[in-house]
Image (tube, rainbow, N blue to C red):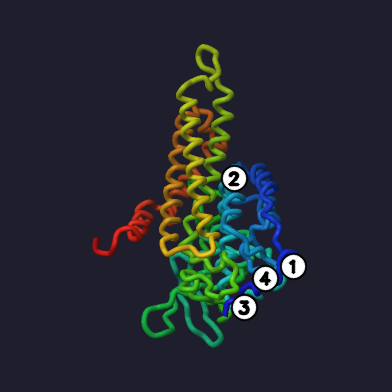
Amino acid sequence: MTVVDAPLSLAAASSLLPAPLAAGRLRAAAARHAGEAERNGRLHPEAVEAMTAAGLARHFVPRRWGGRAGGFAELLDAVAETGAACTSTAWCAVLLAAHGRLAAHLPAEGQRELWGASPDVRVAAAIVPPAGRLARVPGGWTLSGEWAFASGIEHADWILLASLDHSGDGAPAYRVLAVPREQVGIRETWDAVGLRATGSHSVTADGVFVPEHRTFLRETLVAGVADADAAPCHRVPYQLVAALLFAAPALGAARGALEAWTLLVGMRRLPDGRPLTDDPTVQQTLARCSAEIDAARLLLEAAAARADGPAPGPAAAALNQRDSALAVDLLTGAVERLVRTGGARGLVAGGGLARAWRDIHAIAAHAALQPAPAAAAYAATVFPPGV
C-alpha cells in the first residue's frame, strides 16, 4: 500500500497550504559559488543547504509527512531561476525534488522511515538502467553491484537504486529499492565537460539488506499512484514528466548565457569607437536568441501545465516528450549563437557564457531529451498503427 494524502476539510487544507518555493536565496548562493563549484567538481555546502531551505527536498513529499505535494510549473520556475546562476545547482535541485516524488511510491512503512522525522530528506537516485544483483532473502532482498550517474550522491541522505528481480516466475521484475546513503560506497567517476559540479558519480553496494517495505516496482512509476486521494503530483506517470524535469535546468542555462553575453557585448566597441551594440549582427543575435529562449519557455510551461492538470490525456506524455526535446534543441542553438558572437572574452575558463555552453550541451546529451525517440513517441499518437 502507498501512503497518500488523506482528504482534509477546507479550513484544515487552508491552514496547511505549503509556502511557495523560495528560489531567491538559492540563486544567490548558486551565483556566489558557481565558478568554485565547477573547478572543484562539487557543489558548495551553502548551495546544498540553500536547496533544502528553499523547499526543494520536500517539494513532492506527501503532505502527511510535512511535505508540499507541489506542482511542476512552480518547480520549473524555481529551477530555471537557479540555473541562470549555476546550472549544476539547478540540476541537483530539480533532481532533489524529483527523487522525493519517486520515493513517494514506497509503501507506508518505507515512507515513514524516510520522512517520519522530517520531510527535508535529500534523496539521490540511479534507477535507469537497472543494474547490480538482487537476491531474495527472508524479509526482503540483498543488493550488490554498481550504478552510474547518481547525481547529488555526495550530499544525499538516501539513494534509490534499481535492479532486476529474478525471484519470481517469468520475466524479471524491475524493482526500485531505497538504501541509506551510508550503506553504499561512492566511486568518483564523474569528470565531465559540463555539469561538473553535480557529483554524478557511481555508487556501489555489497550485500546490502533492503527490507520489503523499502521497495516498489517500476510499474508503479509508469502508472502513477492510483489512489483517489493521492495528490496530483503523485498520480502523474513518470514518462509524462521525466523529460520536462531534465529540461528545466537548460532553460536556466540559456538565460544565464544571455545575461553573460549581454554584459560582454555591452563592454565592447566597434573599430570606429561606436558601441558594439550598434552592430546589426549583434542586434539580430539578441533578438533571435532571446525569442528562442522565450519560445522554449512557453513549450516547457505548456508541458508543466499538462502535468499539473486534473487528468492528462493519453497523448500528454508524447506531447511533453516532444516539447521538452524541442525546447532543449532551441535553447542549445541559442547558446551556440551567443558563444559564436560573444568574442574571445566569452571563451575564458570560468566565465558564465563558457560554463553555460558546456552545461547545456551536457543536458542536451541526456537520453530523455533525444529528438528521435521523442518524434517516434509523438508520431505514434498521430499515425494509426500500421500506417
The disc, 1 or 4, on the residue closer to the chain's N-terminal end is: 1
Towards the viewer: 27 or 220:
220
Is residue 92 visible in the rendered image? The answer is: no
Q: Which residue is mark 2?
A: 86
Q: CA distance from mark 1 to mark 3?
A: 26 Å
Q: CA distance from mark 4 to mark 3?
A: 10 Å
Crowding at mark 4 (Cα within 10 Å: few <14, some 14-19, many 20+) = many
Towards the viewer: 70 or 43:
70
Q: Are marks 1 and 2 in contact (CB under 8 Å)?
A: no
- Number of numbered discs visible in the structure rendering: 4
Picture quadrant of residue 54: bottom right
Mark identifier at residue 11: 1
Crowding at mark 3 (Cα within 10 Å: few <14, some 14-19, many 20+) = some
Task: Find numbered disc 1 in the image and state the secondary structure of the residue it sits on.
Answer: helix
Picture quadrant of residue 373: bottom left
Q: Are marks 3 and 2 in contact (CB under 8 Å)?
A: no
Q: Are marks 1 and 4 in contact (CB under 8 Å)?
A: no
At label 1, the amino acid type is Ala
Comparing labels 1 and 4, the label whose residue is closer to the camera:
1
Q: Which residue is mark 4?
A: 115
Q: Position of residue 159 (x, y in %)?
A: 57, 67
Q: Are marks 1 and 3 in contact (CB under 8 Å)?
A: no
At label 4, the amino acid type is Trp
